[in-house]
Amino acid sequence: GSVCFMHTRLLHASSPNETALPRTLFISVYAAEDALPYGENPLPSRHAGHLVAGEESGLVRSTNNQLRLPQKPRGASFFVQQAGADRASM
């Protein structure tokens, strides 16, 4: 197997799976304690928000800016989104 570690803002891609075997995936996301999501997770997990180190601050670091909230995908699979089958919700 392979492991790939990357920053969440890194542009990345892979070639289409041309084998008869499924392409399996496990995504684990770590973020700062004060990094809050802008939208709901389409694949909720009992581990979401679990603090693995440090203590809760009750604060959020921010800068003076405006952010457009992301559109919620209709399908939870990012493979579906990559294939363009979820474009109607964008």
Image: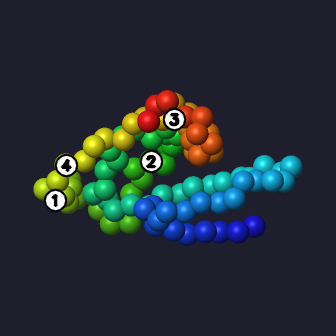
For label 3, the SS is: helix
In this figure, which colouring scheme has been used for the structure? rainbow
For label 1, the SS is: loop
Please state which of the two labelled residues, at mark 3 or mark 2, is closer to the viewer.
3
Residue 60 occupies quadrant = bottom left
* Among numbered discs 4 and 2, the one appearing first in the sequence: 2
**Dot label at residue 37:** none
Whether the residues at callouts 3 and 2 have beta carbons within 8 Å, the answer is: no
Closer to the camera in the image, 3 or 65? 65
Image quadrant in which the N terminus is located: bottom right
* Among numbered discs 3 and 1, the one appearing first in the sequence: 1
Total labels: the figure holds 4
**Dot label at residue 87:** 3
Q: Amino acid at mark 4?
A: Gln
Cα separation, mark 4 vs mark 2, equals 25 Å
For label 4, the SS is: loop
Query: Looking at the image, is 47 positioned above or below residue 10?
Result: above
Question: Dot 2 corresponds to which residue?
Answer: 48
Neighbours of disc 1 within 10 Å: few (<14), some (14-19), many (20+) = few
Neighbours of disc 3 within 10 Å: few (<14), some (14-19), many (20+) = few
The answer to whether any part of residue 70 appears in the image is yes
* Among numbered discs 3 and 2, the one appearing first in the sequence: 2
**Dot label at residue 66:** 4
Cα separation, mark 3 vs mark 1, equals 31 Å
Neighbours of disc 2 within 10 Å: few (<14), some (14-19), many (20+) = few
The location of residue 22, given as percent across then percent down, is 78, 49
The location of residue 78, given as percent across then percent down, is 58, 45
Q: Amino acid at mark 2?
A: Ala
Q: Amino acid at mark 1?
A: Thr
Question: Dot 1 corresponds to which residue?
Answer: 63
Q: Amino acid at mark 3?
A: Arg
The location of residue 63, given as percent across then percent down, is 16, 59
